[in-house]
Image (tube, rainbow, N blue to C red):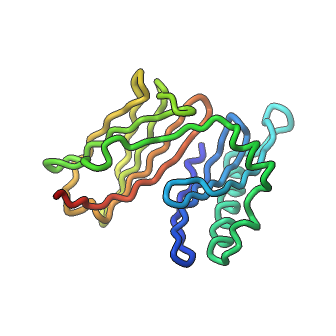
Amino acid sequence: MIFGFNTDVKHGDTVYHVQSEARESERLLQTQVFVRGRCVGKRATPYADPSVDGGFSDPQKEQVLREQHRLVLNAIRDGLLETVLDRQDSREALAAIRQLDVHWLNAGSAHAEHILFLRMRVTDDGVGVEGARLTVRFARPDAAPFYTQVLTDAVGDAEMKIDVHESLLPDSSVLVQASYSGRTATRKFQLRKVELK
């Protein structure tokens, strides 16, 4: 299984979030580029059905996905993003692919009494998905990452609690991968303190 790659890169005044993942059901290695949460372009590499001609091994898929991710990052740094994105007709074809997505429902009020409380929802084309597996990686400074897994309920929601002091939150991140029906979606959330008025 390929977990995927997530990188933030800045060019000029714009921060781009680059997310690469294997889309097993579509047999695609896909890189998406987001600006302020909106997808601005995609690049995808198809791979063969292993039952037909042996296909790619997982290490081969990971290597191709890593190189594709790096290609997009370098293009952004050089101001040449449009040159590496798929052509318009390819983007339209990719837009027709059903989208698995992860939403953090309580991002604005997730921490209380030394507990980080995560309420996540997994959707497929906007509809909650029951039985999706969420793998969560909580990374904080000067400590090993913490991993946990949970399944979504009948409306696509899942809850997790992580014991962590509030002072560590501004330098921490949460990486969430949802897996359902051979498809995955990966999202990275950077934690920051919200001042209440």
Q: Residue at x 67, y 65 (%)?
A: 72
Q: In the rendering, at what x and y percent does residue 89 appear?
A: 81, 49
Front residue of 35/146: it is 35
Front residue of 147/187: it is 187
Q: Is residue 53 left or right of residue 145?
A: right
Q: In the rendering, at what x and y percent does residue 182 appear?
A: 62, 32
Q: Residue at x 74, y 45 (%)?
A: 92
Q: Which image quadrant is residue 40 in? A: bottom right
In the picture, the quarter occupied by the C terminus is bottom left
- The vertical placement of 169 against 54, above or below, is below
Q: Is residue 8 left or right of residue 65?
A: left
- The vertical placement of 97 against 192, above or below, is above
Front residue of 114/142: it is 114
Q: What is the residue that sits farthest to the front in this orientation?
A: 197
Q: Is residue 112 left or right of residue 116?
A: left
Q: Residue at x 56, y 56 (%)?
A: 5
